[in-house]
Image (spheres, rainbow, N blue to C red):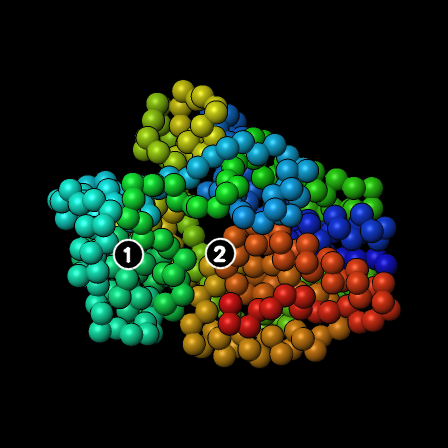
Amino acid sequence: MRFGVAGAGFSGAVIARELADAGHEVTVLECRDHVAGNCHTERDPQTQVLVHRYGPHIFHTGNERVWSYINRFGVLLPYYHRVRTTVGGRVYLLPVNLLTINQLFQTALNPDQARAFIAEQADSSIEVPRNFEEQALKLMGRRLYEAFFLGYTRKQWGLEPNEIPASVLRRLPLRFTYEDSYFSHPHQGMPRDGYTAIVSAILDHPLIEVRLSTPYAAADRDAFDHSIWTGPLDDWFEHRYGRLGYRTLDFEEIRATGDFLGCAVMNYGDLDVPYTRITEHKYLAPWEEHTDTVCIRETSRLAGEGDIPYYPIRLAADQRTLRRYLDAARSASGVTFAGRLGTYRYLDMDVTIAEALATADRILAGIDSGGRIPSLCVDVDGA
């Protein structure tokens, strides 16, 4: 079969490679002038710092198949992500851990004391949190919530925390030790040569053709036996039910001699600071040495037409619209929807790769059995 793949990010690249390895011809059409999607990395020509052009991406996983897969295509060096936040003129550790608690409350609590202390701060009257704010108050109480989550969340999402699902906060840990690594997965690393090099290696196959700066147009659908769509779900259906909501990011570059932050990422939780975080990219590759530095400041806003969609909002109105698109997707023929945009979910890179592998497995199984290739190969309901 001849497959057309819309998008050369991890989803499109992994599916394309698996199909090509099985002997199928694949053409990947990418609207940008580079592969790797929002994971794109490139050397800054002035400083030679490896810059994550669309924000920092840290690889972490507990999935052995995914870890083995990505290591086939590049060298990942150990990297343990650590984040700081500036609030009220002071710098604290994130995620909230024992040092953060002791700093904020000016105490010297041990783990058991801190656990009991936070239990007293927590709002025990909330049985089942209905939103982000209630989840935070039940978990940690008002002081920690207002210091580290209220302002940042308003800026990141452009919404009041009581309008945001509780599930958003459930992904963030609260620790009663001094462990400050942002992630806890057994495999954590950063590609020595960047993500773009890895995605390029995945796409390096004699049966794969990559066309950059080439959007996947409606006319392209008839040029292939089957399409893999990793673009926005509502785009495929030409927004027949309206547009799904996204947040996008504006980036501002900062250059300096020496160091600027002294760490990879600094969040800014105060509401009177308009941006959400600054990344100093040379700290994402600590095995390298650079005299000068490149930082990128991020500001979040609602995505408009033509903006790059980063974070699906998934509020009640979006959920209603999403259900209509998912019903349409399930009944669609000649196309399989995949990836963050194609299924309208926020996905970490390892989950993206895992789902892409599972999607390719199901596509190939459908071909082998002579049955219908499924249009949705992963469970997207309630995600």
Amino acid on which disc 1 is placed: Phe
If the image is split into quadrants, where does the N terminus sit?
Answer: bottom right
Residue 133 visible in rendering: no
Distance Cα–Cα, label 2 vs label 1: 20 Å
Secondary structure beneath label 1 = helix
Residue named by callout 1: 149
Q: Is residue 242 above or below residue 369?
A: below
The residue that disc 2 covers is: 310
Q: Is residue 281 visible?
A: yes
Q: Is residue 7 left or right of residue 248?
A: right
Report the label total.
2
Give the class, few, some or many, for how many residues have Cα within 10 Å of label 2's Cα (few <14, many ≥20): some
Q: In which quarter of the image is residue 76?
A: top right
Whether tag 2 and tag 1 are in contact, CB under 8 A, the answer is no
Label 1, residues with CA under 10 Å away: few <14, some 14-19, many ≥20:
some
The disc label shown at residue 328, or none: none
The earlier-in-sequence mark between 2 and 1 is 1
The answer to which of 172 and 224 lies nearer the viewer is: 172
- The amino acid beneath tag 2 is Tyr
**Position of 119 relative to 33 (above/below):** below
- Residue 125, position in %: x, y? 22, 73
Examine the image and state in which quarter residue 42 appears: top right
